[in-house]
Image (cartoon, rainbow, N blue to C red):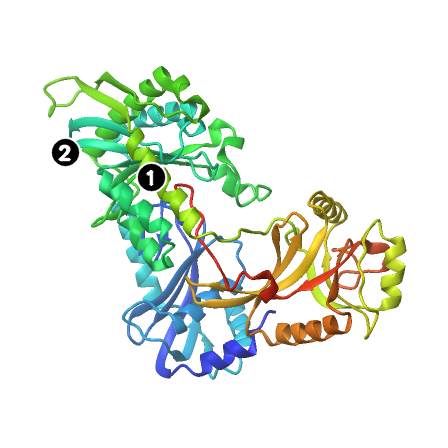
């Protein structure tokens, strides 16, 4: 069982303790129900987990929800503790940070887990067979789900899905960047022109954004490039005024073998499904369409399909010439429409596209920031900071399959090393990638920060000979175990006159896990220990990476 570290316990004990009884539980979401950001949302919305579980912590004395989260069903008990800590330190408004006097749960296994984790926090924990306030909240969720309108108006659902499939086959993201904007003049259903931004050239998210004004499009781009806080970014996202069509896949979520960042284009078409919706500064995000929105989107998609079919070749080689074409688009029979077709004009906007591209270029020139790669060290590797006796170093120099020599002074108890232990094929692949980069130039610990949540870290970095930086570890700045390990690391590096080592070993799942034998050693890199001052990067901050910048 993972316990709270001492710093966290001290922080929690400093919170005022209130004479309240909190209820905590996790419930399976019923079909069609999805919860996010503390509110009921559509299952198709970003961040929803319609097949997951909802974790709730409520103050039964005051009748308020303090924290809520939705997690995959297979997530362990750690998730309920994470939500509880948020309920204490960062509760939903209007609650204030506090510790409860008592916590009650209806699951005995959860109770035993919480007793182990929350000891020393002076909180009484108890079992009760029923949680009336949480029961009432979930009944409200179910009632709201039953009243939710369909995602698409029934009379337009089938043709909209057909047009979405046509757009997927057209794949405009193969030839258009997100800054290459198309204008669609509609002049119907309270829409004059919409401005189309195509997402997907970077292979992160596929679809189109249909802005109702150029101002909304430009303002969002500017705010993204400003690298604002998480709260400001969320406000900027919800401040967009647009319709959208994106694509996702249930198959990818169900297949545990697929990586977290997979490319939808690698899946078969049958696994792809479209998601329609709208964003508005006053309405927020909505993943369903009303009649006029669905009808206008149906016409726009047909116009885009014809435009792409007619002019696709003109965009090859990153060209974006001025093009304009008119199309007569049929519309479904409707008692509100006197005609059965509409004239739609689709045009490229080269000047606007150049302006948006210049925003990105200027931002990159004015605020260069190094990219730290995190794909060199295999996931789930065993990592440790330690020391290797000089006798073992001597044996490794002659026996490992790959050795990068150095000139350490053989003083002190041994060579300070970073040990990365993984599986045999992953160790071999990692060493090959290092060799292709020219070897390791140095190892450094550099301060890092996450400005969105206020956390500070000690980042372990490998610098390869080609100048690239690779993250091998992210350690909490106040973790006492890491503080002690870093102190010893610095002392040992002084004795070796600034030299240290990287050891790559196999045997992750065997008996030698964490303590590899000589036969498990794959590579030894004897390199310089680089100070953060020498690296000259200052504090590295976590940055947003979005597909439409």
Quarter location, residue 473: bottom right
Q: Badge 2 local density, few (<14 within 10 Å), some, or many (20+)?
A: few
For the N terminus, the quadrant is: bottom right
469 w.r.t. 213: above or below: below
Whether residue 514 is visible to the viewer of this picture, yes or no, is yes
Q: Secondary structure at mark 1?
A: helix
527 w.r.t. 84: above or below: above
Q: Earlier in the sequence, mark 1 or mark 2?
A: 2
Q: Residue at x 51, y 79 (%)?
A: 9
Residue behind mark 1? 356
What is the x, y in percent for residue 276? Answer: 32, 36
Depth check: 525 or 232 in front?
525
Residue behind mark 2? 190
Tag nearer the camera, 1 or 2: 1
User: Where residue 56 is drawn, which disc sits there?
Assistant: none
Quarter location, residue 210: top left
Q: Is 508 on the left or on the right of 372, as rendered?
A: right
Q: CA distance from mark 1 to mark 2?
A: 26 Å
Q: Badge 1 local density, few (<14 within 10 Å), some, or many (20+)?
A: many
For the C terminus, the quadrant is: top left
What is the x, y in percent for residue 350? Answer: 31, 29
Depth check: 261 or 466 in front?
466
Q: Residue at x 52, y 57 (%)?
A: 75
Q: Secondary structure at mark 2?
A: loop
406 w.r.t. 339: above or below: below
Q: How many marks?
A: 2
Whether residue 129 is visible to the viewer of this picture, yes or no, is no
What is the x, y in percent for residue 470? Answer: 62, 53
Q: Is 15 on the left or on the right of 212, as rendered?
A: right
Q: Is 411 on the left or on the right of 493, as rendered?
A: right
Cβ atoms under marks 1 and 2 closer than 8 Å: no
């Amino acid at each position: 069982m993972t316990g709270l570290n001492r710093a966290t316990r001290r922080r929690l004990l400093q919170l005022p303790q209130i004479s309240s009884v909190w209820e905590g539980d996790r419930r399976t979401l019923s079909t069609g129900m999805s919860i996010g950001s503390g509110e009921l949302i559509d299952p198709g919305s970003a961040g929803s987990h319609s097949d997951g579980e909802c974790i709730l912590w409520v103050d039964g004395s005051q009748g308020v929800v303090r924290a809520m989260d939705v997690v995959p069903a297979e997530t362990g008990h750690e998730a309920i503790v994470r939500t509880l800590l948020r309920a204490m330190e960062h509760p939903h408004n209007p609650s204030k940070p506090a510790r409860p006097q008592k916590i009650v749960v209806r699951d005995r296994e959860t109770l035993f887990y919480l007793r182990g984790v929350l000891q020393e926090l002076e909180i009484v924990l108890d079992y009760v067979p029923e949680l009336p306030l949480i029961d009432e909240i979930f009944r409200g969720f179910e009632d709201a789900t039953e009243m939710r309108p369909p995602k698409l108006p029934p009379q337009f659902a089938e043709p909209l899905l057909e047009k979405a499939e046509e757009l997927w086959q057209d794949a405009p993201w193969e030839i258009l960047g997100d800054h290459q904007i198309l204008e669609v003049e509609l002049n119907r259903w309270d829409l004059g022109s919409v401005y189309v931004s195509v997402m997907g050239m970077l292979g992160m998210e596929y679809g189109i954004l249909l802005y109702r004004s150029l101002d909304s499009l430009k303002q969002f781009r500017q705010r993204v490039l400003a690298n604002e806080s998480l709260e400001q970014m969320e406000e900027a996202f919800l401040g967009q005024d647009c319709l959208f069509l994106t694509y996702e896949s249930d198959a990818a979520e169900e297949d545990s073998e697929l990586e977290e960042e997979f490319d939808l284009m690698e899946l078969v078409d049958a696994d792809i499904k479209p998601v329609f919706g709208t964003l508005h500064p006053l309405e927020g995000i909505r993943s369903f369409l009303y009649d006029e929105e669905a009808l206008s989107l149906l016409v726009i998609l047909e116009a885009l399909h014809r435009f792409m079919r007619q002019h696709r070749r003109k965009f090859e080689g990153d060209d974006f010439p001025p093009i304009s074409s008119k199309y007569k688009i049929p519309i479904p029979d409707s008692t509100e429409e006197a005609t059965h077709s509409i004239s739609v004009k689709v045009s490229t906007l080269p000047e606007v596209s150049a302006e948006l591209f210049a925003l990105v270029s200027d931002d990159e020139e004015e605020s260069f920031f190094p990219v730290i790669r995190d794909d060199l060290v295999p996931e789930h590797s065993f990592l440790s900071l330690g020391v290797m006796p000089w006798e073992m170093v001597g044996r490794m120099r002659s026996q490992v399959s790959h050795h990068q020599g150095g000139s350490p002074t053989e003083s002190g108890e041994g060579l300070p090393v970073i040990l990365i232990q993984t599986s045999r094929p992953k160790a071999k692949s990692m060493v090959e990638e290092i060799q292709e980069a020219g070897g390791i130039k140095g190892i450094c610990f550099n301060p890092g920060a996450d400005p969105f949540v206020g956390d500070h870290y000690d980042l372990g970095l490998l610098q390869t000979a080609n100048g690239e930086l690779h993250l091998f570890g992210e350690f909490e700045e106040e973790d006492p175990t890491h503080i002690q390990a870093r102190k010893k690391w610095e002392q040992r590096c002084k004795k070796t006159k600034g030299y240290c080592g990287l050891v790559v070993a196999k045997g992750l799942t065997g008996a030698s896990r964490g303590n590899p034998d000589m036969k498990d050693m794959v590579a030894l890199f004897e390199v310089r220990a680089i100070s953060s001052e020498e690296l000259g990067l200052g504090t590295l901050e976590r940055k947003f990476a979005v597909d439409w910048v």
